[in-house]
Amino acid sequence: MLTPPEPDIVIGRDMELKEIVDALLNRSPPPIAIMGFGGMGKTTLASKIFHNSKIKEKYNARYFVSCEGVLNIDQFWTKLAIAFLLKLELFSPGEDQLMEARKMAQIQNQVVGFLKQGSTMLCLDNFETLWESTKGSDELQEVLKRLNVITPLGLILTMRGTQGPGLIDWKILTVVSVTLNDSIGIFRSVVKKDPDENSMYLLKELAGIPLAIHLFAAMVKDGHEGTESIKNRWETVGTSIIERGEEGRLSQLDFSIHISVDSHRITPEQKVALIILAYLPTGLKDGTILKSLDALIPNFHNNLRKLQRQALTSLSSGRFEMLPPIARYCKEHLKISKELENQLKEESTNIRSILMFGCQENVYGEQPEFLIEACIKYTRHLLDSGLQPDQGLIQAALQLTSENKLIKAKTWKILGEIQYQQYQIDKAVSSFEEAINNYESGDILNIDNSDYASACLWLGMVYIVVVKYSESEKFSHKALVIFQQENNKIGEASSFGQFGDLYYYMGRLEDAKEALDKALALYNEISNQPGQAISLRRLGDLYMKMNKTEDAQEALNRALALYENMNISTYQLGQANSLLSLGDIYMRTDKLEDAQEALKKALSQYEKISNQLGLANSLWGLGNIYMKIDKFEDAKEAFDKALAFYEEISNQLGQANSLQSLGDLYLRMHKLEDALEALNKALAFYEEITNQLGQANCLKSLGDIYMRTDKLEDAQEVLNKALAFYEEISHQLGQANSLRRLGDLYMRMDKLEDTQETLNKALVLYEQISYQLGQANTLKSFGDLYIRMNRPKDAQEALNNALTLYKEITNLLGQANSLRSLGDLYMKMDKLEDAQETLDKALALYEDVSNLLGQANSLQSLGDLYMRMDKLDDAQEALNKVLALYEDISDQFGQAGSLQSLGYLYMRVNRPEDAQEALNKSLACE
């Protein structure tokens, strides 16, 4: 049996050491239990006592026996006998139980007899292992009584908790956290130098747990990782980073905490109490609020007391508290049932009611800061958990009189965050501006620069939404400078990430990429996985806008892998957001089945974390897919559900986007009045929230309606308004799209020179922003223009160039549209075989992407072609298919055209009655 070496130095335990040594030196020493939470240094203290010179002098024999791995009483007696080097009668295989019992009784008598022989000290280390494995059985309690009555014996044990085992009259000494000064002393004793700023931060976070401090100090001493990197990983990953590589309670902080938190003694009710206390950093006062909670949560107060006996909580100055590393572990790792999780969400409402009562009654009088801080921390918990806090509690906290500008600033800031989440952007702007004003009052900047920088970053973010790009750039830059001065790498990376967003919306895509690359590099430098994932997701969205679909897909898949690797519920939102963006990529590249799968996975993730905004966004994306594959009823259902979610969370932008999509859907369904109503509602929302981009997009869609209803002058007016909005906000993509639509309009108006000029402007803009899809669409429009101008060679060249670009970006729908136009061109050039081959290819592509309208239009062209080729049976078959497709998608104009073609066909085959019926139906459709 190995005796532990004497610790070189034990810092912060002088009083405990003296008290125990003095007790053991008494003529009749009491049994001593060194109690406390795991990692507090119980074993170290016991080892120091074991090697104390006065103890050695008094006790002729000293034995230090670890109970780790001892799971039953027989193993315990056997381990003692081996430690005492007693001669044992070995058990033989196949012996009956009676014989085994006799031999075990003999071992027990040998051990007790040995301990009675002289002055002996016996230390039983990690006694909780045996106590828990036997569940504190009566038999084990009898063993302790038997040892306790041995008069010369100095008995000492170490055990997790605060209550000694059994009914023995223990002298209990509970070891608690060491002071910050002692933490620094432990750090110095290991590293041989003073802690730097990052180390000081971590020493405070580790809350005086000696094991954690020793492990952290050893990590610093190893030199494999800088203190800044360790600090950043602590902030993002948590307790699991404090370790030395080997698995075990002495080399991993997580493992040590796990032994206590996941003990069989911790009941589901106690886990609920642990989680609630974990989210109250300043603890919970044993008073009115606790009584209220006890009435709401079964046995809450009683369970806190039981957790205190397990050393998981403590009662200090009338407050139940939990050490920050334990709270962090509980929030990150504690698993509870879905039922309990739902109960917790319900109880969070009750906690809010208690805090609201405190604010309304001003229970803290002239010193309300503690209550305001509690309201802020409770609201922060809801925000971080993806829940939906309301503004009432924070607004009530703001009504409390406080001269503390920092508290006021923090309160305004978190109110702004709630308003931003609910997309009350104008209110959020005002709240963040109030926060900034309070931060800038007096000497507060010397107190918390990083918090001020965070508020600047938030203000910069909301300015992006209200399209105040210059103001956003100003405050984002302020934040960046402060974070750099404070050497706050996370803040610096967040600032570059925000610049990426800003430049993205300004259409400065190369600048956006440069900023996001810097953000990613910083997150890589400090091993910040959440930051890496967010940056990769943003880059994925950017690459999508730059039409670099392969790069976008790679970035988003890397982000998704990081989120899955972190495997913490906090990051399920990021995982869902990445799936949402992947769905968008697949949709743009016409991988509609993959898009549908990704969005349904995102929808499922958002449902798990009850994120209504994510649910709404996923449904909106699914609606766009269904619209693309002509499943109009499914699309309408998805858009309606999305709209309901957006209304529920008061997200005006989401409501506007859903109404705009419904307008586009009704346009596709040829329900032009419904389309007009939906788009005008969307336009009103966009105007209310001052969203010029949304207004421009709506006006562009209204232009499509007016073109469909032959209101060409109205179409020209709204498209020019849209163009003006895009120019005002420097949105080059929107400008290019509007110019292309105007080009198509001028073609309809037979203003072919204006068409050519406008399309050329659009093409130049698309080339400037490297937007290949826009270039391809414009070349397709040029092809249609040249057909109208009877310039077949130019038309063929333009359409082939468009086809090449569509192939480069894997846009199947664009390829199909180009092939159909080429087919029509070949018909006009009397290249009927080429026309048939090309239209067949177009039809196949439309079928691949499930585009019913495209299939119908291609079959219509094939029907007309077969009539030209005198293949009248083929023509009739094609036109009947066309008619069925147009009926399926409720396209009356298409039905009218196909019935007209059928009428001409019936005239060709001398079926005048059928011809008359078809032509009359055609007129009725129009």
Image (cartoon, helix red, strand yellow):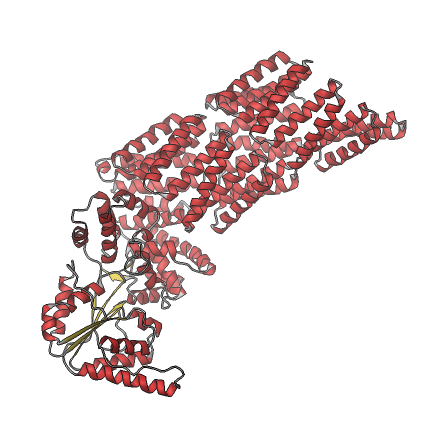
Please state if 642 lies on the left or on the right of 350 as rendered. right
**Quadrant housing the C terminus:** top right
Q: Is residue 605 visible?
A: yes
- The x, y position of residue 125, in whole percent, is 24, 69
Which sits in the foreground, 749 or 540? 540
Q: Quadrant of residue 829?
A: top right
Name the one closer to the observer, 281 or 128.
Answer: 128
Where is 513 relative to 296, above or below?
Answer: above
Name the foreground residue: 779 vs 110. 110
- Picture quarter containing residue 703? top right
* Residue 636 picture location, percent across and down: 62, 40
**Where 725 sits versus 126, above or below?**
above
Q: Is residue 368 visible?
A: no
In the displayed structure, would residue 98 be above or below residue 490? below
Classify the position of the N terminus by image quarter.
Answer: bottom left
The structure residue drawn at horizontal position 55% and vertical position 46%, both measured from the top left corner, is 600
